Image (cartoon, rainbow, N blue to C red):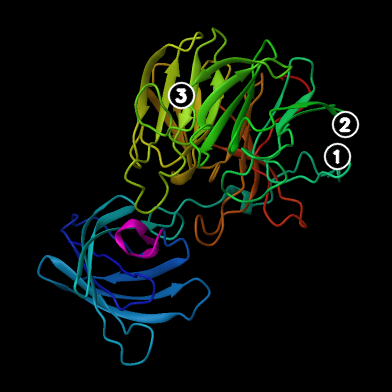
């Protein structure tokens, strides 16, 4: 039997865990969360517990955000574990009880806080803090193949400033396609009522805007793919309040004419005819369409209706199959964030919430997983199978000890051979990458 940990936004904690096997040790740092729709703190992205397990004893600390670090003690009682500390103000003896199970790096269960019972709760062990730690290859002295930074490239028309963007691709003519979330930075519907064009074509050399379109057609553009015929595919990862746009994959001509839509406008769903926060889309050489669906699987616990799947369609949009599910086992995902093919036609999936890449054949059969490329937001594989994986999310909470940047290797192996660090003045590293030149 092993341990459990606790913390629910500043209250004292009492935890119980089932027997998880003699070989399991949960020493390390854990990120905590609970479902906000059940009256408990949401997500818990700033709630951290550090545990040390010695036989039947647990000691540790907890911290909420940048608040003070408080000590905790714990002990095994029969098949359960008990941890507790004073909550907030001196003398506060409020106790929280968690009962759950441990599976690999994830704990799930329910909590009791005073008279409140039944709230869903989960904890995720932070990679690099326990016995399964994988060191960051970027922490070594890796070669930087692109040390020159071109400042202020891709200027928008006068009077318009960039918002956020997490996607970029290169068309058959060599020019750059990207999107701007309508000058906004919020993680919300920012484009459905905007009058600016979010989809942009930029000159590959000068960054001048060559074409733009799409005003009012999206809520939150997220993934972009340009196929071999120059058609532009966009995933719209949110819906608007009116339920008229969002949760779709749309194929456009280079001029912005709609050629195909997948999913139902403004409707989130888990069936074959709907998406729930689609992240990315890519087409195979034969025209088959692959969509990475589900942006909330990394939350703790995930929302009840969250998805985490890869969906395959024929070139005309007929549904073929799907695979996945929320989890950390091979073939499961916690936010499949980006897609790419290598020269063999293998499908690489950026399983961002699990800090890994997963590799499949085009029928969804699992082949391998890579952990050296970190918490990948986007990836690109060129004709020589050079793999570029961009990490925009690693930090002290999500992936402690790992650096933001672009890790480079070969698609044939889980090994990083070069690293492009983020530019020092940028507060958060970019989350889309493509390589100009041969192979694209």
Residue 140 drawn at (x, y percent): 64, 52
Badge count: 3
SS under mark 3: loop
Residue 133 in the figure: left or right of residue 345: left
The picture quadrant where one finds residue 1 is bottom left
Residue in the image at 46% along x and 24% along y: 263
Left or right of 364: which side holds 104? left
Pair 3/2: label in front: 3
Q: Residue at the spot x=44%, y=60% of the render?
A: 129
Q: Nearer the viewer, residue 246 or 277?
A: 246
Q: Secondary structure at mark 1?
A: loop
Q: Which mark is residue 425?
A: none
* Image: 342 above or below 118: above
Instruction: Please report contact status of discs 1 and 2: CB closer than 8 Å, yes or no.
Output: yes
Outermost residue, front direction? Answer: 242
Please report the bounds of the magenta region as a residue range: 28-42
Instruction: Examine the rendered structure and indicate whether residue 94 appears above or below residue 424.
Output: below
């Amino acid at each position: 039997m092993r341990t459990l940990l606790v913390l629910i936004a500043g209250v004292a904690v009492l935890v119980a865990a089932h027997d998880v096997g003699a070989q399991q040790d949960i020493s390390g740092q854990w990120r905590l969360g609970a479902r906000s729709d059940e009256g408990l703190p949401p997500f818990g992205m700033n709630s951290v517990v550090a545990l040390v397990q010695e036989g039947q004893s647990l000691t540790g600390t907890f911290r909420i955000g940048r608040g003070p670090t408080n000590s905790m003690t714990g002990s095994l009682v029969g098949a359960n574990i008990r941890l507790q500390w004073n909550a907030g103000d001196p003398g506060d003896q409020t106790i929280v009880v968690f009962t759950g199970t441990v599976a690999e790096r994830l704990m799930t269960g329910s909590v009791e806080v005073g008279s409140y019972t039944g709230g869903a709760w989960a904890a995720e062990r932070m990679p690099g803090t326990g016995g399964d730690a994988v060191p960051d290859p970027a922490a070594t002295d890796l070669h930087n193949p692109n040390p020159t930074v071109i400042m202020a490239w891709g200027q928008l028309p006068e009077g318009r400033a960039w918002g956020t963007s997490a996607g970029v691709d290169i068309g058959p003519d060599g020019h750059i396609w990207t999107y701007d979330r309508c000058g906004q930075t919020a993680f919300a519907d920012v484009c459905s009522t905007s009058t600016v064009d979010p989809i942009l074509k930029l000159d590959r050399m000068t960054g001048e805007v060559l074409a733009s379109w799409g005003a009012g057609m999206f809520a939150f553009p997220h993934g972009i793919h340009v196929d071999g015929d120059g058609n532009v595919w966009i995933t719209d990862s949110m819906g608007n309040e009116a339920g008229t746009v969002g949760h779709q994959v749309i194929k456009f001509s280079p001029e912005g004419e709609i050629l195909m839509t997948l999913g139902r406008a403004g409707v989130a769903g888990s069936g074959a005819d709907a998406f729930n926060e689609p992240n990315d889309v890519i087409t195979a050489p034969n025209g088959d369409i692959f969509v990475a669906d589900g942006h909330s699987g990394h939350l703790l616990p995930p929302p009840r209706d969250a998805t985490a799947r890869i969906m395959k369609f024929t070139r005309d949009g007929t549904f073929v199959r799907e695979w996945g599910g929320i989890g950390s086992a091979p073939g499961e995902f916690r936010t499949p964030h980006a897609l790419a093919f290598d020269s063999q036609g293998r499908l690489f999936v950026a399983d961002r919430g699990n800090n890994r890449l997963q590799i499949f054949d085009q029928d969804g059969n699992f082949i391998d997983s890579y952990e050296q490329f970190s918490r990948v937001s986007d990836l690109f594989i060129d004709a020589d199978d050079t793999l570029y994986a961009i990490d925009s999310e690693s930090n002290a909470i999500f992936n402690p000890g790992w650096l933001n940047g672009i890790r480079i290797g070969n698609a044939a192996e889980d090994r990083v051979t070069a690293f492009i660090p983020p530019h020092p003045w940028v507060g958060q590293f970019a989350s889309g990458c493509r390589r100009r030149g041969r192979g694209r």
